[in-house]
Image (cartoon, rainbow, N blue to C red):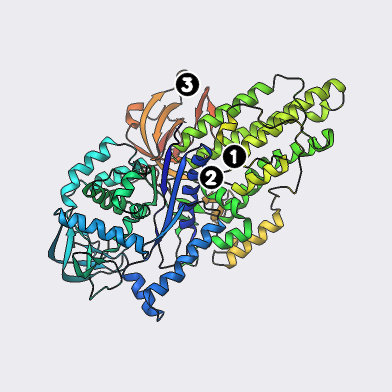
Amino acid sequence: MKKKTFFITTPIYYVNDVPHIGHAYTTIAADVAARYRRLAGDDVFFLTGTDEHGQKVQQAAGQSGREPQAHVDDLHVRFKELWIRFNISNNDFIRTTEERHKKVVREILQKLYDEGEIYKDSYEGWYCMPDERFWTEKDLVDGNCPECGRKVEKITESNYFFKMGQHRDWLVDHINQNENFIQPKSRRNEILGFLKQPLDDLCISRPKERLPWGIPLPFDDEYVTYVWFDALINYISTFGTLDKIRSCGFWPAAHHLIGKDILTTHSVYWATMLKAIGLDLPENIFAHGWWTVNGQKMSKSLGNVVEPNHLIEQFGVDVIRYFLLREVPFGLDGDFSHKALIGRINSDLANNLGNLLNRTLNMLKKYFKGELPKIGTKGDEDAPLIAKSAEVIQEVDQLYGELAYSKILAKIWEFLDAGNIYINDTAPWNLAKSDDGKKRLATVLYNSAEACRVIAILIAPFMPQTADKMMEQLGIDTPVDKQGLDSLKKWGWIQPGTQTHQGAQIFPRIEDKAAAKILEEVAVGGEAPASEKNVETNGKGQITIDDFMKVDLRTAKIIAAEKVKKSKKLIKLKVDLGTEQRQVLAGIAEAYEPEQLVGRTVILVANLKPAKLMGLESQGMILAGSDGDAIILGGFDGDLPPGVRVK
């Protein structure tokens, strides 16, 4: 049977600065999807790279007294080296200064020019140098760039333009007809809102006398290509010519992963370019959120930039890979906290994952000299564990289609919890006391080891080193990629008689003293000391800003509401969080009728543990104020899209 193909990309990163945690986030997310599809047996192509042309690069090189090419030759290595440290499994790393890329850019420019998609015209507009982008008068906000807020300068010059505006109606139709083309939903709505206005043609050149650092236009050597037109072609140039990409079997891509700040360039510029070129659009452009630190955007001036290499040295690669994709739903903004990171290490990784593996191997060593026994007597507890494995495997596969990384990990941890509960309920230490019990003990420890193997394969895309360590301690020589997802189709892949090799605990706890030292070092490095972060709470004690930031408050739009039968107070709500929909039960039935609530934007505690009320699951909590019998829902003066973080 022919393999399925799977093409996934990150944006190519601009080499004007060192890579930060935001770059790592996108690249790790793409890597996880690529690794999973390889486990599924697909033929995967995973692309990343660096964007090396443009005015900012030229200026930075000039300030350092170097030629631009020498400047970017040094800077791009930082990204390559970081991806090696993070175990990124990319198939290619493209640089826009490579000849293979420049050749395809020139081919596409010439094609569009010959077909009348490009024309020359004089232009007067406001130019933002940091964004390397022209704006019209109506675009400016208080006279400044609408994207970055910085000053603009008025420029009049002749340039070449791509007839982007003529493709506006087609693009609106394409977005409306393909719900998954732009995700999450809130970003899709953002672009549809943008396209309600007339779409201007795109200036795709810069005069060489003003900016020599770029790819010369093939039809006019006095101009170089605008950096965004040049950069977006990297997704094609990795395969060679236009003919080669049509025949490579990978196009169109399954996922283009980007940060939300470059959504317009990809979903509008790039999409219309592809239409003009005659190529299909990607199946999905996924624009994820930003990472902040204590509620503030990372900034050198604030001294709060999270440096990935330092995190790796402190906590290890797999810990960071896990935390970034577990802590926040992919698509929403997230707040980085060392305290939350340490909490995840101790609870999820040490207490849960490490504990299950460690106690399984301990008992195998104690009762069977480390050798995996044959299954003996079966019991009532076995079937639910095996059924839970099948359920999680199936649901995880579906969630990968949505890039719902935090949900995937939550599902895997459901099975991990089931493994720990299974050991507690079967009490192997009691079974070992009798001969009949030992037959049952053999089954329990076999199933526990098999559960560890299943978990190792499921977490391998997120934590490849950890998965390998687990296999090594379980005594399994077959690499994870050779076992693949096929090995999960039937319970009992691991062979009896396998000799386990218990090693050091894979995730030791970070004890209180060590955690306090880490947090103190972080505070000295730029965060306010804990004593300065306290908040008054009218005599009800004080919390730190870190305590408050643990609560994930999000805007949620109520899309359905109905009263809960046999309850005077409860209303069942269906709310839209932008990236997902949830069911929430709210005790507001005495203050609001269901029809009053539909369409309303409320504040949701999004990371509250689900609870059952009147037999129904509530997946969050709506915020409201009360004064005696009066209940008033929290809200906003203006409109906000679903999923925005409330700070």
Marking on residue 265: none
The structure residue drawn at horizontal position 58% and vertical position 56%, both measured from the top left corner, is 338
Q: Residue furthest bottom?
A: 65
Report, in whole angstroms, how far the alpha carbon at label 2 lies from the one at label 1. 26 Å
- Asked whether residue 607 appears in the rendered view, the answer is no
Residue under label 1: 482
Of the residues tagged 1 and 3, which is closer to the observer?
1
543 in relation to 414, above or below = below
Name the one closer to the observer, 429 or 98.
Answer: 98
Q: Position of residue 140 (x, y in %)?
A: 23, 62
Specify the quadrant of the image occupied by residue 208.
bottom left
Where disc 2 sits, the SS reads helix
Name the residue carrying label 2.
326
Task: Give the mark toward the camera: 3 or 2.
Answer: 2
Q: Nearest the camera: 379 or 473? A: 473
Q: What's the residue type where badge 1 is placed?
A: Lys
Mark 1 or 3, nearer chain start: 1
Label 1 sits on a secondary structure element that is helix
In this view, the residue in front, 216 or 536, is 216
> Residue 98: which quarter of the image?
bottom left
Q: Is residue 297 above or below residue 463?
A: below
